[in-house]
Amino acid sequence: MKVVISSDHAGYDLKIKVKEHLEKKGYEVIVEGATSGTEPFSYVEAGQALAKDVLEGKAERGIAICGTGIGISIVVNKFKGLRCGLCNNEFMARMLRQHNDGQVLAMGARVVGLGVALNMVDAFFDEQFAGERHAVRVNDIKKQEEDLFK
């Protein structure tokens, strides 16, 4: 599976560690966003690059990281067709996939430690969408997007 991971400068170090973790598991990783943790890089640009990669089919799923995860998750969710969830623990990451069929996991580098981050990543990629009653809700979200973007 191809995955895109993007961050601002605050999320750079965690982005690199998550990238290495994913590559060890056999994922092909596209890296977007900041190229260092010291030079300022906007979470807006980082989120836009990730969203475009997923929507254009360059990657199946994405991981978005900024200092808190809030800003970059807002940016990604502005793109029609994407469901990005800001998660702070493994359970939330698991539910993002199982109940919401989320394509993008967002996290805050200043909020979660490396162990929690990697556990969330593993849960996000191991979990499958449950469908059934959850599919009804995801379809309601899609319909809402269609209504809003007419």
Image (cartoon, rainbow, N blue to C red):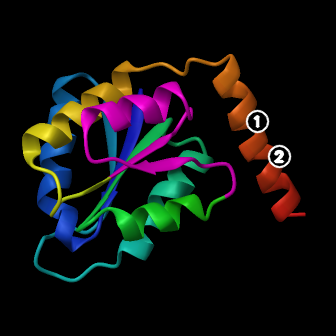
Q: Which residue is the site of mark 1?
A: 139
- For residue 126, above or below residue 141: above
Tell me if 60 is positioned left or right of 86 in this view. right
Which quadrant: the C terminus? Answer: bottom right
User: Residue placed at 44% from the left, 64% from the top?
Assistant: 47
- In the picture as drawn, the residue positioned furthest to the right comes out as 150
Which quadrant: the N terminus? Answer: top left
Q: Where does residue 21 sit, x and y in percent of width and height?
A: 16, 34
Is residue 95 magenta-colored?
yes
Q: Are marks 1 and 2 in contact (CB under 8 Å)?
A: yes
Label 2 SS = helix
User: Few, some or many C-alpha atoms within 10 Å of disc 2 (few <14, some 14-19, many ≥20)?
Assistant: few
Nearer the observer, 15 or 120: 120
Q: Quadrant of residue 65?
A: bottom left
User: Few, some or many C-alpha atoms within 10 Å of disc 1 (few <14, some 14-19, many ≥20)?
Assistant: few
Label 1 SS = helix
The stretch in magenta equals 80-106
Let me know if residue 46 appears in the view: no
Q: Which residue is the site of mark 2?
A: 143
Tell me if 120 is positioned left or right of 127 in this view. left
User: Residue placed at 49% from the left, 50% from the top?
Assistant: 84
Q: CA distance from mark 1 to mark 2?
A: 6 Å
Let me know if residue 116 appears in the view: yes
Q: Quadrant of residue 3?
A: top left
The amino acid at mark 2 is Lys
